[in-house]
Amino acid sequence: MLNYIWGGLIISSLVFALVYDTRDLMRDTYRNGAEVTLEVDLEGDSTGRRQPARVHMPQERYQALYNVDNAPGTTFDGTLVRTRDGMQLRFAQDAALPEPWKTIRDMTSPRDNDLRGTVTRLDMHTDSTATAVIRFADVKFVKMTAIAQAAIDMAETAVTLALGLIGVIALWMGLLKIAEAAGLIHAVVRFTQPVLGPLFPEIPKGHPALGMIVLNLTANMLGLGNAATPLGIKAMEELQTLNPDPDTATNSMVMLLAMNTASVQLVPPVILVALMGLQINQLIFAIIIVTMISLIVAITAAKLLSRMKRYRIPPTGAGAAMTGPEG
Amino acid sequence: MEFLRSFIETASVFVLPLLIVGFPLYGLLKRVPVYEEFVDGAKDGFRVAVTIIPYLVAILFAIGMFRASGAMEFVVEGLRPLLSLVGIPPEVLPMMVIRPLTGSGSAAIVLDMIQQFGEDSILVKMAATMFGSTETTFYVIAVYFGAVNVRKTRHAVPAGLLADVVAMIAAVYVVRLLFG
């Protein structure tokens, strides 16, 4: 299943990028090469290289030019830059721009994040007011560029995320080693065997794996995401010691995964609390009900799907090479 | 109800320090060489984190590309008529699609919806309940299976996603029942 989903994500992103970029080309979304007429209020000294400018783009003119419904803010801050090659109008960095200007900026000036137009004509009405005709750089294949950039960015993010886990994983692995040596895990196992044992039939009675699972699920219930992940990893490691085929997930592993993704949430995750503030108090009850429902579904699904032909553990040895695509 | 809630909240604050102090304390009482055992166990931290990297890269870059391609809008548009048929408001659709893929992305959606509809809106309550009730399934799968180098995940993805879908739909109805 993961093979198909993964491949599907990559291939469909290429297809969608192609479709959207072709549509942009056909509609000429960015009006490449078009002359854009703006009203400009120039401030200060006109002999300098850089002159502050306030740019007005009448709403109707913008909508007519780009054939959009949204309207730009009435005025933008900018700078008129005079160089030997001519004049350039630069919008202020990180200015709030309407589409498609925002995309034109993101594509043509990714580093400075200021929209730049080459001034082809500047008609001065008075000393400080003028009508400027500018032209933006051509924008093509926005989505194509975006998917390539996203792939690179996310690969970096993945490493940052993984390395960021080192400390907290080390902390919990250390603490768990103490707990194991002191016999604490075994006590937890004895205590919870009657309840959780039937869900994980492959785990022998008294095996520490069950203790790790209990700690992991408890941390999850209490919204302790930071602790839950290392505890879950430790539980997976314990389950892996019972796995006859280290490359393939066991039923217990899938059960643990399913219970994790659907775990009953007594305390909502920290991010949600930060986002919702006090409003979250109203939702705690709703979240508990919903997670209870999804936990039941997860357990049932893990149990039932494990019996389906395509998800059965392939026989080890010679037969293994013959099995079809795995999930 | 109020008492139970404050009890749970207080417990969640205390449980972490209690575990961090409790394990070594219990170890000392049992005459375990706690420092040596801790360091011995903690050695694994680096190895585990590095083992996860290829799995995390694989999952995250594919999701990143998918989001950047604009495919998400298409999926949302495509599902809209189907879901309005079962009474799910189209405004919460982006949340349903993004939640299993990225945690930060779905947090951004909650924030966006708060600004758009206001904190009190039932739509925000639905989206927030969805966020709180489900996990970033693909991330969890990458990390957990990655840590033990299991590549054949069998029915983990369908089981996890099924639970997510049910939770999303349940969130809509439960919130409507409680606040609607």
Image: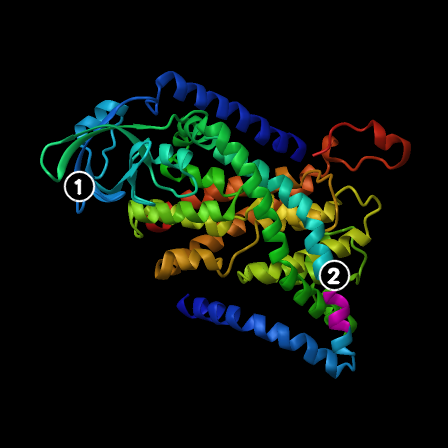
Can residue B40 be found in the magenta stretch?
yes
Region of the chain picked out in magenta, as a range: B37-43
In the rendered view, would you say B119 is above or below A306? below
In the image, what residue occupies the spot 72% across and 35% down? Answer: A311
**Dividing the picture into quarters, in which one does residue B123 lie?**
top left
Give the amino acid at mark 1: Leu
In the image, what residue occupies the spot 74% across and 31% down? Answer: A309
Direction left: furthest residue: A126
Asked if residue B3 can be seen in this view, the reply is yes
Out of B36 and A261, give the one closest to the viewer. Answer: B36
Q: Which mark is residue B44?
A: 2
Residue A36: x, y in percent?
25, 26
**Which image quarter holds the C terminus of chain A?**
top right
Q: Which mark is residue A170?
A: none
For disc 2, the neighbor class at 10 Å (few under 14, some 14 to 19, many from 20) is some
**Which image quarter holds the N terminus of chain A?**
top right
Asked if residue A255 can be seen in this view, the reply is no
Out of A89 and B49, give the one closest to the viewer. Answer: A89
Residue A11: x, y in percent?
58, 26
- Marks 2 and 1 share the same chain: no
Q: State left or right for residue A306 relative to residue A21.
A: right
Out of A43 and A37, give the one closest to the viewer. Answer: A43
Dominant SS type (magenta): helix
**Dividing the picture into quarters, in which one does residue B79 lie?**
top left
Residue B150: x, y in percent?
74, 44
**Helix or strand or loop: what does disc 1 sit on?**
strand
Chain of the residue under the numbered disc 1 shown in the image:
A
Spatial CA span between label 2 and label 1:
63 Å
Give the amino acid at mark 2: Asp
Q: Which mark is residue A42?
A: 1
Report the mark closest to the observer, 2 or 1.
Answer: 1
Residue B65: x, y in percent?
54, 34
